Image (cartoon, helix red, strand yellow):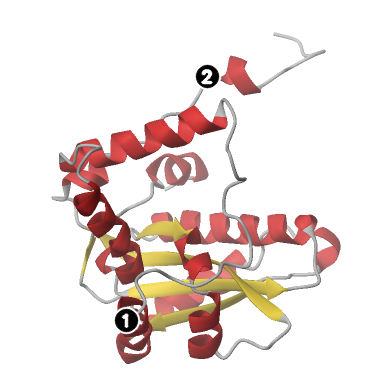
């Protein structure tokens, strides 16, 4: 699989098979991903990989607190404006359409949302944190590290779903992962094998055409 194929294959999977992922494969992916770009070579990422009993412990704590905790950062800016508001709205509508859940069925939508806390059935979870004192450039580094993880997973036939949902559980994750006080959780990621029979995994989020967000000047044809 080449890079272009991995980029095309990578989607957010929200239904996984229970088949375990070998620890050696997870370590191999994470070590290879550490070649991701890092300004000044700060390498600000810290990652915790959980499976088996440790992951079950985390899931149990989340089930006991379904409303979450006070997040340490806003995943989305408050009062989203256009075009971001419409993009996020359409993404949600497309997702629930794969499940046949109408907008007015709030209970079913909340039930689906809660599956984030189960990592959508994935047998492994990755949790990314970084030092509280770093700034936006280092947050970008962590994002590039995560993208590299996802592409390497795709190369190996694995599926992923990046989940900023876990920003809702900073205290729980700090306890379970034994994070030092100077570190905060950024995101989680489900890792495993996609359930190809699940309708929700047919979702391909929309992308605007190049002309909406791209500009090129001074190039030959």
Provide the secondary structure element on which disc 1 rests.
Answer: loop
Task: Examine the rendered structure and indicate whether residue 196 appears above or below residue 46.
Answer: above
63 or 7: nearer the viewer: 63
Q: Is residue 205 visible?
A: no
Taking the view exactly as shown, the residue that stands out farthest to the right is 40
Taking the view exactly as shown, the residue that stands out farthest to the top is 221
Q: How many marks?
A: 2
21 or 89: nearer the viewer: 89
Task: Examine the rendered structure and indicate whether residue 95 appears above or below residue 56.
Answer: above
200 with respect to 21 (left or right)? left
The mark found on residue 209 in the picture is: 2
Determine the CA span between mark 1 and mark 2. Answer: 43 Å
From the top left corner, tell me how far across and down residue 2 is, in percent: 47, 45
Q: Depth-wise, is mark 1 or mark 2 nearer the camera?
A: 1
From the top left corner, tell me how far across and down residue 153 is, in percent: 43, 60
Residue at image position (42%, 39%) is 8
Q: Residues within 10 Å of mark 2 (few under 14, many from 20)?
A: few
From the top left corner, tell me how far across and down residue 105 is, in percent: 19, 44
Task: Examine the rendered structure and indicate whether residue 118 appears above or below residue 183.
Answer: above
106 with respect to 12 (left or right)? left
Provide the secondary structure element on which disc 2 rests.
Answer: loop
Look at the numbered discs 1 and 2 and tell me whether their residues touch, using CB distance below 8 Å.
no
Residue corresponding to mark 1: 64
Residue 19: image quadrant is bottom left
Residue at image position (55%, 54%) is 147
């Amino acid at each position: 699989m080449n890079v272009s194929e991995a980029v095309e294959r990578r989607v957010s999977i929200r239904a996984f098979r229970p088949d375990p992922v070998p620890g050696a494969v997870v370590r191999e992916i994470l070590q290879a991903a550490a070649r991701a770009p890092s300004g000044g070579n700060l390498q600000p990422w810290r990652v915790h990989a959980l499976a088996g009993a440790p992951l079950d412990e985390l899931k149990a704590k989340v089930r006991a607190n379904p409303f979450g905790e006070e997040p340490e950062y806003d995943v989305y800016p408050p009062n989203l404006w256009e075009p971001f508001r419409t993009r996020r709205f359409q993404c949600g509508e497309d997702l629930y359409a794969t499940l046949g859940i109408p907008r007015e069925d709030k209970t079913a939508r909340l039930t689906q949302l809660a599956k984030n806390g189960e990592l959508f059935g994935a047998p492994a979870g990755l949790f990314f944190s970084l030092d509280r004192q770093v700034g936006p450039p280092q947050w970008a580094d962590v994002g590039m590290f995560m993208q590299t993880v996802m592409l390497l997973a795709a190369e190996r036939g694995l599926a992923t779903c990046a989940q900023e949902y876990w920003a809702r559980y900073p205290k729980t994750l700090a306890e379970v992962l034994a994070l030092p006080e100077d570190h905060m959780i950024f995101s989680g990621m489900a890792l495993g094998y996609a359930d190809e029979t699940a309708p929700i995994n047919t979702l391909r989020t929309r992308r605007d055409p190049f002309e909406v967000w791209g500009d090129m000047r001074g190039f030959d044809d």
